[in-house]
Amino acid sequence: MSDQILGDGLREWESPLYHETVGQFDRVADIMGLDDNIAERLRVPQRAIVVTFPYRRDDYSQVESLFGYRVQHLLSMGPTKGGIRFAPDVNLGEVAALAMLMTWKCAIVGLPFGGAKGGVRVDPTNLTRAEKQRVTRRYTAEIINFIGPNKDIPAPDMGTDEQVMAWIMDTYSQQVGHTEPAVVTGKPPALGGSVARREATGRGLVSLLPAAARLAHLDTEGISVVVHGFGNVGRYAALAADQAGAKVVAISDISGGVYNGRGIDVNEAMSWVDLNRSLEGYAGGDRISNDDVLLLDTEVLMPCATGGVITDHNAGEIKAKLIMEGANGPTTLAADRILNDRGVLVVPDVLANAGGVTVSYFEWVQDLQNYFWSEAEIVGRLREILSRAFDDVMSVAVGHKTDMRTAALIKGIRRVADAKLARGVFP
Ligand code: NAD
């Protein structure tokens, strides 16, 4: 069906990740016997904005043009919510797929949002701080009519951070004429950001480790963990795993991996990256390639870098018994089938990395009320929501005799379908 839809003049979404995401949706819609009319609506995003805009390099005479995107997959559940990524390969199809995944993720953990995603096709490592600020502010100005606390609330993703969110919030506030913290989440705490948002995705991922390890028949004491990707998600996942008594034996980033069988000193590695921007030159273990990092002999693998890293080419050689997806879409559909057949337990992205959007939801609620919670309160509520979602997904998995990814998607899609059926068709 996805090929038919893509072939019916909707080629603008064409991208490997969109194919994967729609293919996954079609499979699950079929299993759960989803109403055909609802399935057709959910297969494509409700709204997509493509902008091109100029920005000045620090050399004032040099003006470059960039592509930017914001896709809102579903407007029926409340405002839309999702990150903004700055990366050299961002395209409309990828952003559309990620927006759809956000819809399922919010529905799985029970948040009152539809999914969205945004991006600018630019290599952020190639921008000075001033250039990045100009790109951010102009991109925000281009999409300003489509975002807002009750419309669509961006957050950080690959290549963006608290500072970028602060610039978006400032640009939006300047335009509307008053300070509006609730327009973005993942801001610095001084601007109404959550004290625990930065760590939320990695911390949330690791909070599910004991329950997932039990299912995979693994002992959590000293359990070996490999973390692929050492950015916002990966570094706090590694830190939380270390603090929970696991042994983090390898970490990696775009510059390659570091392996240490006695355990990586995660705090030291974080300080190194803060000073040097990457793990390049870090001497806390043996240097290995990113491909080898994924194939290490470990009990748990946490892919926390980017999409499509576990494919049918390497899935058969992965030695981990448990994969917890910190990144969005790290496993292709073909790889997923291989891992399932091999009995590897995969805790899927839509559940495993939902800690980020959950604490973003808390941040938005606190901004709207101007009433801020303590870190302990935030972390406690995060654990409660994720652990309830995990148990609910497991009940669906047992009921349908299926894997966790299918079960999570059944749960999310069911909630969305119920809401859409209750609202009906306008006019
Ligand atoms: P980030 O930019 O902070 O970090 C990305 C990390 O991955 C960096 O260490 C980078 O060097 C590394 N990397 C990039 N490409 C790589 C490759 N091909 N091989 C190995 N390492 C590579 O991004 P982030 O915010 O940590 O996001 C990472 C993933 O997690 C993305 O898929 C994102 O969509 C997803 N995610 C992020 C959040 C969040 O709160 N930031 C929440 C949910 C999901």
Image: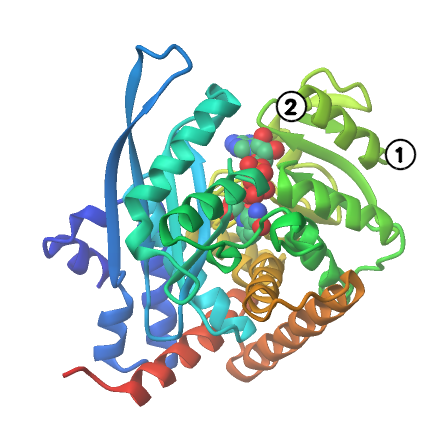
Task: Count neighbours of disc 1 (C-alpha within 10 A) and say few if under 14, some if 14 to 19, many if 20 or more.
Answer: few
For the C terminus, the image quarter is bottom left
The kind of secondary structure element at disc 1 is loop
Quarter-wise, where is residue 356 in the image? bottom right
Q: In the image, residue 193 lies at what x, y percent?
A: 62, 54
Is residue 264 in view? no
Q: Amino acid at mark 1?
A: Arg
At 44% from the left edge and 35% from the top edge, which residue is drawn? 86
Residue with the mark numbered 1: 262
Q: Amino acid at mark 2?
A: Arg
Residue 230 against residue 256 in the figure, above or below? below
In the picture, measured across the screen, residue 200 lies left or right of residue 153, that is right
Quarter-wise, where is residue 230 in the image? top right
Residue 63 against residue 70 in the figure, above or below? above
Q: In the image, residue 346 lies at what x, y percent?
A: 60, 58
For the N terminus, the image quarter is bottom left
Residue 280 against residue 346 in the figure, above or below? above
Is residue 85 in view? yes
Q: Nearer the viewer, residue 50 or 390?
A: 50
3D distance between C-alphas at marks 1 and 2: 25 Å
At 79% from the left edge and 50% from the top edge, which residue is drawn? 241
Q: Is mark 1 within 8 Å of ligand 1?
A: no
Q: In the image, residue 258 lies at what x, y percent?
A: 73, 27
Residue with the mark numbered 2: 277
